[in-house]
Image (tube, rainbow, N blue to C red):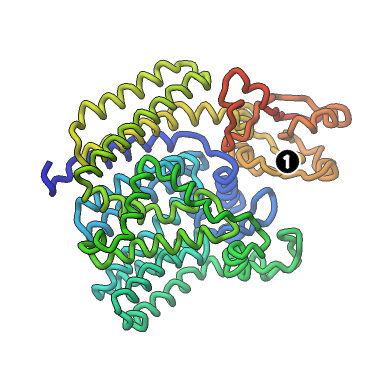
């Protein structure tokens, strides 16, 4: 393959996109995905686009855009898991496109394609296609904003408008902290290259004004739902300002750990998170990042490279210093990680090439061996079919791509992710979803009692039941709440096992169906082992009062 030939990378991108599609047809996972889906469903049911409700109460945490996008999809396609996941999937494809465009314009077309291959095949991007939250949206909108602002250097005002629009979209997904990865890279780039005048150019100040104009729907929504109603109880207190939460508590409050939502920070958290989240590229990425500390390795790179790694470094550092940390936060800098890794791969030769040829081959074999072992350990109905598919994919990667070359490393690494996606989306996740009792109960109720009035008693995390059950789900936080509505016709209640004796003894409850439950996003060895799984399962019930 000559240096300009990009056919392989186009093929890999198409393959990765096609292999991602089965994720669209899987269920919605708890907790966050099902919570967001149920809140988006409430927008449609209540015909209220400005007030957000979760668990049957006013909800103040993330901004509205995640829910608006899902609700628009529900409005067009109907309320379903597919409709919930589709906007996220399309956003991921848009992110890969903008990554290609940015890397191509700063470097060349080949780096653009390789960066997109790396991005689409990173483990946490893969899992986010199934367990849909908000991070793919943030990543794409932030990246799109960086691209358009980069192009605005050439003087087109349209790019200022587009960059500000996407920056505003990112804010409407997560909050104002997303401006750090957008602007930090530019500011450090201007300072390092002594382009101080850029800081005072009118177009950048216009960009900031435009951002605030574009986020006014969010400000209006928060003001009308919370600031106009100080009597509402939020975070167990009254007088909560939605605007203050948006501009301070949700962002700086989490960073300094003095807001209503607190966490425990560990400065090394994202170092080890990246190690698994960016597989199969993480070892290459860490090597590439360390390599950049040597001045000679930066000498022949475009000056704009500073913008890429400064954006990644500043964001990574702030996340690491924060007291509130979750693994999916790191996705926002995966585009920058992908470019840094692609640049290193392109220059790989000699001893380094041989080392990473061995490392990536070893990683492919290790991943496929672990997945094969899990197929037997978990107790699938057809484990040897799964193992056979994995062997075929691994054999194809070795037969189709030969020789100690960068192209071979990239192709075999991408095939590692293809095998992983097929395993997760077609076999593993669907098997796990059978133990998400809320979605199983909601689907059963929709099929057998479509006119039911569903409710949840003394359980606040019934997000998937909330989404899958027909109509609006009532949350009952006490038996006093139950007594107020117990005579409603077709009332069917979703309850944990602990509530069953009282319901049967005092309310003459009839059990319609029982469901097995496990917290499937926190897997344990006992659950994964088919022989010990029953030891860790809980049970939930659908009951009808007589």
Q: Position of residue 111 (x, y in %)?
A: 23, 52
Q: On screen, 451 above or below 60?
A: above
Question: Quick one: which residue is furthest to the left in this view?
Answer: 2
Q: On screen, 71 above or below 148?
A: above
User: Is there any visible trace of residue 450 in the rendered image?
Assistant: no
Q: Quadrant of the C terminus?
A: top right
Q: Position of residue 405 (x, y in %)?
A: 19, 39
How many numbered discs? 1
Q: Nearer the viewer, residue 276 or 155?
A: 276
Q: On screen, 341 above or below 526?
A: below
Q: Residue at x 31, y 58 (%)?
A: 292
Q: Position of residue 481 (x, y in %)?
A: 81, 45
Q: Nearer the viewer, residue 126 or 496?
A: 126
Q: Relative to 225, is 120 on the left or the right?
A: left
Question: Quick one: which residue is furthest to the right in this view?
Answer: 506
Q: On screen, 252 above or below 413?
A: below
Location of mark 1 (residue): 459
Q: Quadrant of the N terminus?
A: top left
Residue 390: name its quadrant: top left
Residue 470: name its quadrant: top right
Q: Nearer the viewer, residue 286 or 304?
A: 286
Q: Secondary structure at mark 1?
A: loop
Q: Relative to 366, is 327 on the left or the right?
A: right
Q: Residue at x 39, y 32 (%)?
A: 420
Q: Nearer the viewer, residue 251 or 49?
A: 251
Q: Position of residue 522 (x, y in %)?
A: 59, 37
Q: Residue at x 25, y 53 (%)?
A: 112
Q: Residue at x 43, y 32 (%)?
A: 425
């Amino acid at each position: 393959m000559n240096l300009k030939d990009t056919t392989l990378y186009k093929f890999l991108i198409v393959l990765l996109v096609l292999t991602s599609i089965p994720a669209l047809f899987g269920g919605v996972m708890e907790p966050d995905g099902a919570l967001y889906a149920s809140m988006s469903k409430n927008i449609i049911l209540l015909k209220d686009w400005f007030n957000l409700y979760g668990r049957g109460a006013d909800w103040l945490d993330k901004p509205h855009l995640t829910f608006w996008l899902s609700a628009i999809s529900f409005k067009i396609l109907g309320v379903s898991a597919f409709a919930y996941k589709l906007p996220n999937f399309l956003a991921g494809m848009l992110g890969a496109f903008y990554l290609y465009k940015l890397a191509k314009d700063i470097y060349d077309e080949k780096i653009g394609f390789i960066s997109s291959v790396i991005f689409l095949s990173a483990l946490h991007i893969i899992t986010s296609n199934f367990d849909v939250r908000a991070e793919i949206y943030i990543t794409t909108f932030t990246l799109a904003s960086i691209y358009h602002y980069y192009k605005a250097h050439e003087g087109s005002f349209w790019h200022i408008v587009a960059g500000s629009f996407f920056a505003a979209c990112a804010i409407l997904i997560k909050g104002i902290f997303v401006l750090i990865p957008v602007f930090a890279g530019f500011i450090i780039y201007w300072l390092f290259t002594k382009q101080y005048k850029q800081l005072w150019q009118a177009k950048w100040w216009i960009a900031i004004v435009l951002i605030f104009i574009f986020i006014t729907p969010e400000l209006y929504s928060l003001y009308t739902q919370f600031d106009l109603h100080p009597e509402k109880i939020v975070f167990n207190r009254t007088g909560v300002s939605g605007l203050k939460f948006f501009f301070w508590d949700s962002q700086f409050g989490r960073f300094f750990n003095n807001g209503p939502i607190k966490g425990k920070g560990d400065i090394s958290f994202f170092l080890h998170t990246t190690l698994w989240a960016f597989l199969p590229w993480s070892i290459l990425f860490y090597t590439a990042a360390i390599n950049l500390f040597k001045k000679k390795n930066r000498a022949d790179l475009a000056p704009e490279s500073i913008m890429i790694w400064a954006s990644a470094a500043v964001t990574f550092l702030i996340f690491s210093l924060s007291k509130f940390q979750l693994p999916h936060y790191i996705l926002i800098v995966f585009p920058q990680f992908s470019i840094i890794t692609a640049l290193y791969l392109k220059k790989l030769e000699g001893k380094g090439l041989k080392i990473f040829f061995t490392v990536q081959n070893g990683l492919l074999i290790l991943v496929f061996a672990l997945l094969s072992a899990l197929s037997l350990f978990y107790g699938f109905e057809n484990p040897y079919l799964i193992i056979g598919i994995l062997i075929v994919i691994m054999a194809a990667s070795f037969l189709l791509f030969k020789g100690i070359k960068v192209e071979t490393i990239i192709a075999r690494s991408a095939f590692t992710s293809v095998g992983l996606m097929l395993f997760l989306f077609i076999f593993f996740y669907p098997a796990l979803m059978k133990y998400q009792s809320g979605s199983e109960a909601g689907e059963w109720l929709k099929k057998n009692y479509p006119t039911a009035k569903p409710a949840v008693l003394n359980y606040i995390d019934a997000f998937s039941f909330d989404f899958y059950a027909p109509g609006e789900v009532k949350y009952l936080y006490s038996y006093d709440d139950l007594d107020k509505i117990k005579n409603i016709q077709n009332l069917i209640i979703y309850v944990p096992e602990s509530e069953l004796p009282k319901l049967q003894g005092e309310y003459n409850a009839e059990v319609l169906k029982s469901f097995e439950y496990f917290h499937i996003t926190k897997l344990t060895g006992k659950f994964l082992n088919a022989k010990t799984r029953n030891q860790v399962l809980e049970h939930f019930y659908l009951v009808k009062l007589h």
